[in-house]
Image (cartoon, helix red, strand yellow):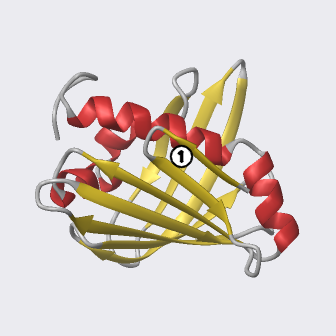
Amino acid sequence: MTSTTRETQIVSDPDVPLVRIAREFDAPPEKVYRAHVDPALVVQWMGPREIEMRIDHWDARTGGSYRYLAVGDGEEYGFRGCFHELRPAELIVQTLTFEGDPDGVALEKYRFEDLGGRTRLTTTSLCDSFADRDAFVASGMVDGATAGYEKLDEFLAGGAGGTT
């Protein structure tokens, strides 16, 4: 599966149970990175507009962990994981588990590439199996990432509650 919405490119690898998402932002890597690690900023842009993000726990450091809730239409969905490596404005390596499927764990890498004042963010999510990867894609997580990145564009431009 490959689709493009605005500048968001989403590819499901045919040979490995991996989803790759690439997106460019009109902000330097430091700002895009901070928007991914500062919980006060994360809740302002992550996920679709109709979903409220609530941080339960957020310790964004190498060896730290997190848990957040996506809340909408009277439903709550919990997500948790561990931060394995954080390199400011360069790299985030973390795990992600949807609490509705506690046996499914994705290994995620976020790479922040400096394009001279702009940033190319490439995210890979490696799942346990093709079935888990396909369920991840079918669940709307990929669409949520696309919608969230549209909100992040607005946020970085100062149009959604401030600047980073």
Judged from the image, the secondary structure of the residue bearing numbered disc 1 is: strand
Nearer the observer, 135 or 41: 135
Q: Relative to residue 104, is residue 151 depicted above or below?
A: above
Nearer the observer, 33 or 58: 33
In percent of width and height, residue 80 lies at 59, 58
Query: Do we see residue 102 in this rendering?
Result: no
Query: Do we see residue 97 in this rendering?
Result: yes
- Among all residues in the image, which is located at the extreme left? 116
Question: What residue sits 39% from the left and 31% below the top?
Answer: 151
Lateral position of residue 60 relative to residue 56, left or right: left
Question: What residue sits 81% from the left and 59% below the top?
Answer: 134
Q: Quarter holding the C terminus? A: top left
Q: Could you tell me the amino acid type at mark 1?
A: Tyr
Q: In this figure, which residue is indicated by the disc labeled 1?
A: 68
Residue 159 sits in which quadrant? top left
Is disc 1 surrounded by few (<14), some (14 to 19) or many (20+) residues within 10 Å? some
Question: What residue sits 34% from the left and 63% below the top?
Answer: 60
